[in-house]
């Protein structure tokens, strides 16, 4: 949540901050602001609304300087308005702070600072940081920041500038993402790589407690105990275009269309010339495997839906009991986990606070930890023992699509590998599933080459108040993902149910004209799904079915069928989700929604 950019160098800072923030707007977009240090003062401009409002403001009331910080906000404490927007200042207005995270003890600190004579303007937790730094400031900004963060409880990535230190930018992190960009005669801080790509590909990943002290020509990093740390520079190899829209109307659509390639990128490095899986990133020996008696997959939102399919695939191929849990629930339920548990955290961003906390809980209980993530160097990737990168490339749209599909592919690869190693999967079946997986980039492409039936349906169905998704087995898991996509970007109420559960309650809501999306790809459950479709149709529902190409008789029952290419039952989720993503997308387009920046959401949820 919230995007942070900071710059120190020789160039005009405002355009650099605005350009960087435009690349981070997916992190939060209810207000934005900048602070610039120049001519012995710190000037702050901030506005409620999208970044464009701030841009407009800065084009009228220009500010100039070569040191500054910028922020795009996702509100936690205090409504989105001009005053609560970042940066926040101390009473005298000579220290400016931007922050991503939550300061849990801010009320106590605020009361104390008010007693000390500090005057607060906003309702935010962040403002205490500016006043704290002011309280401890005796000429040394770094020392004041160190003393201040020692008082903070919670999560933070913070960047600070001060009028008294016009040649210094100080940044610190704990449990919220922050990277340092290395330039020539200029240096940067940012929440995420896309904000820096235009200027540098060399970055340092900060660890919890690290303080980065940036000048034009130098970067010094201190750990939480004040000792200097030498870090390796990480060179980002992304194509800059990967983080741009490239002619598509929205990032989401671009990312949907990138899925065939994303599948390829996830598969190719892991399948050798003989068609065998080689997961050298996962260090599980045969002995380790003998000891594992349970797998726990933990994730949030879309990644959780990938975890559900992971459960199915691992239980099917590797015959190990798997629990899949949402991360926000996992650690509060006193989970039964020990050294014989394999814990898999699934997270696109690798920064999701709940998933990270769950991973730490599992670690505390001695589980073996694997992270399945898309972001190299992310917190989750660095805290796990082994990391399985999904290689989807940067995903910018808040609604996850290509990252999800690569999470599914990753789950299947892990399941097949475990199955073979444990001897629960025959070599023949293993080979045939891998062979089929390799066909998926083409099969996904085939769906994407025929979107007009989906568009037409969206144009007719975009006015629904409520939509239900139903399916059985893995089709139910895909329905849940389709339902989440729809509600996220179109704001239509939507629910996904296991089709067999329908008559235990939800059927009471089915009435004339209501839209049902029935995912019906599983041969062994096909007849049962037909009965469920008939049940809702008998009550007036309009049913769109998702089925395999050879299941044409479903046309006799459903009102409309969207087909996916023929494939084996176990792998259908990778294909059947694509029409659901597209349907959600085109419905949101028809409703005129801001698809890449849905209301109240942010791409990376770094607060609990
Ligand atoms: C996906 O469309 C959502 N924006 C959201 O559910 C997301 O999947 C969830 O917040 C988890 O994020 P992560 O994969 O980065 O951990």
Image (cartoon, grey):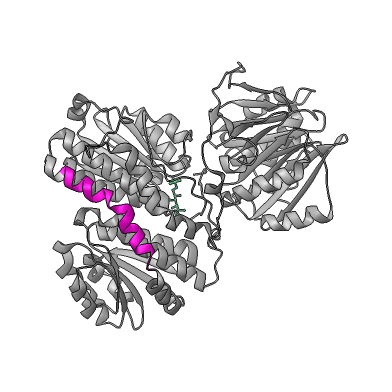
Residue 462 in view of the camera: yes
Say how many tags the image has.
0
Let me know if residue 286 is in the magenta part.
no
Residue sitting farthest toward the front: 273
* Vertical relation: 203 (above or below) 410: above
Residue 535, position in %: x, y? 22, 77
Residue 468, position in %: x, y? 34, 70
Q: Residue at x 44, y 30 (%)?
A: 382
Classify residue 486 as left or right of residue 502. Answer: right
Residue 496, picture quadrant? bottom left
The stretch in magenta equals 430-450
* Vertical relation: 77 (above or below) 534: above
- For the residue pair 470 and 38, the one nearer the viewer reads as 38
Residue 112 in view of the camera: no
Residue sitting farthest toward the top: 227
- For the residue pair 156 and 124, the one nearer the viewer reads as 156
Q: Residue at x 45, y 39 (%)?
A: 350
- For the residue pair 42 and 286, the one nearer the viewer reads as 286
Residue 331, position in %: x, y? 37, 39
* Vertical relation: 285 (above or below) 453: above
Residue 385, position in %: x, y? 36, 28
Residue 288, picture quadrant? top left
Classify residue 348 as left or right of residue 275. Answer: right
């Amino acid at each position: 949540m919230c995007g942070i950019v900071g710059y120190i160098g020789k160039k005009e800072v405002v355009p650099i901050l605005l350009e960087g923030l435009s690349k981070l707007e997916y992190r939060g977009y209810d207000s934005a602001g900048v602070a610039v240090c120049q001519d012995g003062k710190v000037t702050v401009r901030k506005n409620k609304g999208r970044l464009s409002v701030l841009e407009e403001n800065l084009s009228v009331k220009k500010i100039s300087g070569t040191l500054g910080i910028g922020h795009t906000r996702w509100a936690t404490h205090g409504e989105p308005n001009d005053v609560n927007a970042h940066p926040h200042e101390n009473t005298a207005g000579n220290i400016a702070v931007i922050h991503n995270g939550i300061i849990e003890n801010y009320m106590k600190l605020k009361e104390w600072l008010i007693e000390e004579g500090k005057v607060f303007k906003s309702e935010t937790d962040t403002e205490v940081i500016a006043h704290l730094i002011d309280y401890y400031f005796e000429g040394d900004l770094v020392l004041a920041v160190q003393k201040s963060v020692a008082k903070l409880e919670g999560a933070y990535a913070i960047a600070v500038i001060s009028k008294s230190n016009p040649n210094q930018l100080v940044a610190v992190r704990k449990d919220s993402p922050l990277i340092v960009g290395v330039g020539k005669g200029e240096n940067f801080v940012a929440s995420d790589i896309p904000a820096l790509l235009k200027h540098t590909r060399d970055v340092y990943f900060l660890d919890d407690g690290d303080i980065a002290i940036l000048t034009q020509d130098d970067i010094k990093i201190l750990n939480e105990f004040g000792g200097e740390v030498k870090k390796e520079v990480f060179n980002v190899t992304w194509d800059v275009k990967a983080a741009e829209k490239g002619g598509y109307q929205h990032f989401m659509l671009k990312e949907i269309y990138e899925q065939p390639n994303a599948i390829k990128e996830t598969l190719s490095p892991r399948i050798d010339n003989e068609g065998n899986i080689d997961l050298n990133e996962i260090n599980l020996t045969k002995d380790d495997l003998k000891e594992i008696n349970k797998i726990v997959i933990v994730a949030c939102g879309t990644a959780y839906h990938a975890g559900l399919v992971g459960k199915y695939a691992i239980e099917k191929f590797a015959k190990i009991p798997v629990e899949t849990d949402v991360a926000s629930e996992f650690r509060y339920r006193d989970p039964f986990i020990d050294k014989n548990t394999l814990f898999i955290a699934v997270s696109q961003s690798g920064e999701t606070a709940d998933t990270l906390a769950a991973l730490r809980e599992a670690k505390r209980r001695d589980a073996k930890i694997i992270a399945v993530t898309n972001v190299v160097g992310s917190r989750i990737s660095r805290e796990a023992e082994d990391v399985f990168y999904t290689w989807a490339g940067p995903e910018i749209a808040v609604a996850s699509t290509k990252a999800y599909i690569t999470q599914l592919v990753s789950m299947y690869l892990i399941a097949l590998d475990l199955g073979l190693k444990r001897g629960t999967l025959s070599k023949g079946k293993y080979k045939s599933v891998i062979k089929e997986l390799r066909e998926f980039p083409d099969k996904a492409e085939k769906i994407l080459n025929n979107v007009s039936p989906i568009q037409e349906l969206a144009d007719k169905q975009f006015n629904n108040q409520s939509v239900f998704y139903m399916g059985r087995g893995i089709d139910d898991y895909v329905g849940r993902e389709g339902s989440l996509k729809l509600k996220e970007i179109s704001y239509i109420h939507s629910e996904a149910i296991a089709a067999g559960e329908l008559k235990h309650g939800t059927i009471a809501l089915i009435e004339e004209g209501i839209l049902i999306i029935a995912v019906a790809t599983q041969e062994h459950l096909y007849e049962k799904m037909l009965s469920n479709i008939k049940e809702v149709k008998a009550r007036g529902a309009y049913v769109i079915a998702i089925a395999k190409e050879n299941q044409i008789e479903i046309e006799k029952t459903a009102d409309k069928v969207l087909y996916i290419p023929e494939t084996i039952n176990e792998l259908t989720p990778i294909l059947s989700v694509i029409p659901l993503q597209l349907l959600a997308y085109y419905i949101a387009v028809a409703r005129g929604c801001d698809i890449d920046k849905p209301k109240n959401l942010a791409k990376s949820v770094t607060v609990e």
